[in-house]
Image (cartoon, helix red, strand yellow):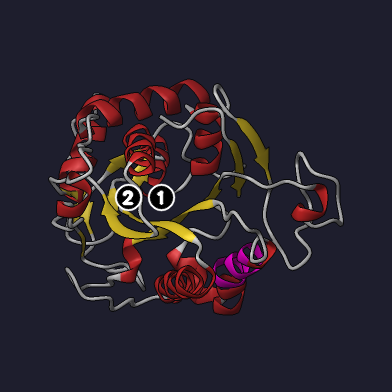
Amino acid sequence: MIKNKKILITGSKGFIGKNLNDYFKKKNKIYKTIYLDQDILKKNNLPKNKKLNKFNINPDIIFHCAGPSSVSESFKNPKLDFKKNYLTTKYLLKEFINNKKKPLIYIFSSAAVYGNSKRKLKPISPYGKNKLKVEKLCKYYSKKYKFEFIIMRLFSVYGKGLKKQFFWDICNKLINRSFEFYGNGNEQRSWLHINDLIQAIEKLYIKRNKLVTLDIGAPKPVKNRYIVNLFLKKNKLKIIPKFNFKTREGDPKNLISNNKKIFTYNWFPKVKIETGINEYIKWFNKHYK
């Protein structure tokens, strides 16, 4: 268990960052940043216009959540995606390059590094390409500067409070009585509940190494058609959804996690997709319906 540690969370207002803060603040000292730029500006808990190390903030652990999370937006502005994904990480690492004791850094990468491939790294979006560049940067810093990384390739993380991506889109469509969805419905995703992600973080901390890279996702992928029908059923809508057979640019057909490595750390997801969706619908209906 991670406790009595100094933890820095970048991107602390995002979905993952906020959940990590809420969970780990109970037993640890948390420092938070909204985002990072070349001067490490706009902290929540830190004085402005100063660098982290000038205030002797030497975290034991960094959760690097800062950065964009939209494949579609990366096509609209690939330079901005590069800046917020790759350069953000580079600025962060430079802050601690001279520390004798380097912090353990959790890097939240993405299944997008695979593109349409099951195992090979063949990203098909600027977002995926920049995530892969971040991974390579971390490997370089690990070898040259003795940094310690846990690189987590995340697959379709969800949970109550998430205001974007597939679940959010479905709920808004149902409110607007729109029942048309992208693709053919047979696309598969290895959905990962935020609580299971947090437990994976705990497990990996106990058995960490100098550089760990692995997939984090549910072992059993689920078809998009099944997900949509679950939302319809839970909302008591007897509607047959329509799939338009259109593919959005950069969206892989399948995002299926290769979980064999993470299972060796004694981690297994506990939240069933049906339970997670029911929780999400209750949250959405309470706040937005």
78, above or below 135, in the image: below
Q: Nearer the viewer, residue 48 or 117?
A: 48
Magenta segment main secondary structure:
helix
User: Residue at label 1?
Assistant: 165
268, above or below 189, in the image: above
Number of marks in picture: 2
User: Residue at label 2?
Assistant: 156
Find residue 29 and report its horizontal and vertical position in percent.
63, 31
Find residue 47 and report its horizontal and vertical position in percent.
85, 46
The mark nearer the N terminus, 2 or 1, is: 2
Q: Nearer the viewer, mark 2 or mark 1?
A: 2
Q: Residues within 10 Å of mark 2 (few under 14, many from 20)?
A: many
Q: Which mark is residue 249?
A: none
Q: Helix or strand or loop: what does disc 1 sit on?
A: helix
Q: CA distance from mark 2 to mark 1?
A: 9 Å
Find residue 41 and report its horizontal and vertical position in percent.
79, 56
Horizontally, residue 157 falls left or right of residue 49, namely left
Identify the image quadrant of residue 132. bottom left
| Quadrant of the drawing holding the N terminus | top left
Q: Nearer the viewer, residue 128 or 163?
A: 128
- The reply to whether the C-beta atoms of the residues labelled 2 and 1 are less than 8 Å apart is yes
Q: Residues within 10 Å of mark 1 (few under 14, many from 20)?
A: few
Range shown magenta: 84-93
